[in-house]
Amino acid sequence: MIKEYNIKELQPGMITAIPVRTKRGQLVVNEKVALTGALIARLEFYGIERVRIAEEDDETTFGGEEELEPGYIPAKTPAPIKSPVLDASYSQQVKKSSEFQKFQVDFTLRCNDIKECFESFLVSGNVDRKKLLEDTVSLIGPEQTTIDIFDMLHNMRQVNDSIFAHSINVALISRMIGKWLHFSKEDLDTLTLAGILHDVGKAKIPEEILNKDTKLSDEEFQLIRKHPKLGYDILKNLAVDSHVKKAALMHHERCDGSGYPMGLTLDEIDDYALIIAIADVYDAMTAARSYRAPLCPFEVIAEFEKDGLQKYKPEYILTFLRKIAMTYQNNRIMLSDGTTAKIVLLNSNHLSKPLVQLDDGSCLDLDKSQLYIKSVI
Ligand SMILES: [Fe+2]
């Protein structure tokens, strides 16, 4: 059975019956996706007023995987979440804060600056290094903690997911990694600039291909894989640090040789590119996709652990994952079965699986359980 709901009546866990599009036809959330607080905020942002929801007793809608369209990747938790404590609460708290409101405005302005900067490259070949850097770094107030930045970035997801927003995210995450690795102020600035400009080559790829909702053809896929080289070509004659140029060229290389465009290995890849690779993958994993909700940080850590840490420089990836996990220590979380708990002790051998304390006071070692952390609440 399909029922139409007003945006105000939507609850996390409800499942969309049909793709939700704006009046201009832009896809906001695909069909058969379990809504989260973040996705509901995204729908609100796009001015969606009514959403058609598949009700639970609808056997025909969710009869099984064979009914899913080709290429569809089901949301990780297709069943509605019954817990009264919803993952929306934490996110909504962040979004209501005046810091977030300011961040949102600044972030959107910075995106426009970066867009203009990319476009001016194509025309004049000049980069206003100082302005770009100052603008981006100014997004991080001196008093902001790691958790503030990561929360802000996570919550910006629903409002701006363009490649310019991605560039700022990668710059800020890279800068954070650089700080954890005790980079000097000057090196942090170079690393941040490398983050802002790492995907500049995408400015040479038609927007219809970059934003394509459907599967890419082989030619389109190969064209997108050219963006590191295209970016390097844009930057190579400019007066910017060679790390910035190499980061554009090498951020898709992987330490085990499995990356592109050259299949380089650890010793051959620029150090800054190694950091940006981690920030880039982290940001892509936490992004909302039309076919699924954004992954929570612990799901991302699990993905890194599953995918193989040998792809990244050990010192960098371990520092990064440990810091991310530590950021959320003592936070309340929701487990994959909908129960809520608090993180009490990290497991350094398996960072995505800490020891948690359930609401009845008992402790659960996630490393010995099938359950995993579904969201930070
Ligand atoms: Fe890239």
Image (tube, rainbow, N blue to C red):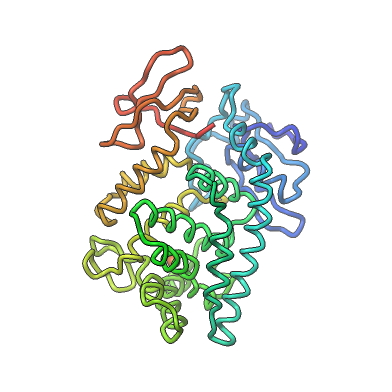
- In x, y percent, where is residue 164? 57, 65
Q: Nearer the viewer, residue 187 or 19?
A: 187
Q: Residue at x 55, y 62 (%)?
A: 136
Q: Residue at x 57, y 29 (%)?
A: 80
Q: Taking the image as four quarters, which one is ligand 1 found in?
A: bottom left
Q: Nearer the viewer, residue 120 or 229?
A: 120
Specify whether 167 is left or right of 113. Answer: left
Specify whether 162 is left or right of 365. Answer: right
Specify whether 8 is left or right of 253. Answer: right
- In x, y percent, where is residue 345? 35, 27
Q: Residue at x 50, y 34 (%)?
A: 375
Q: Nearer the viewer, residue 118 or 174?
A: 174
Image: 79 above or below 129: above
Q: Quadrant of residue 246?
A: bottom left
Image: 237 above or below 182: below
Q: Residue at x 63, y 52 (%)?
A: 103
For the C terminus, which image quadrant?
Answer: top right
Image: 162 above or below 16: below
Residue 211 visible in the shown view: no
Residue 22 visible in the shown view: yes
Image: 206 above or below 101: below
Q: Nearer the viewer, residue 59 or 281?
A: 281
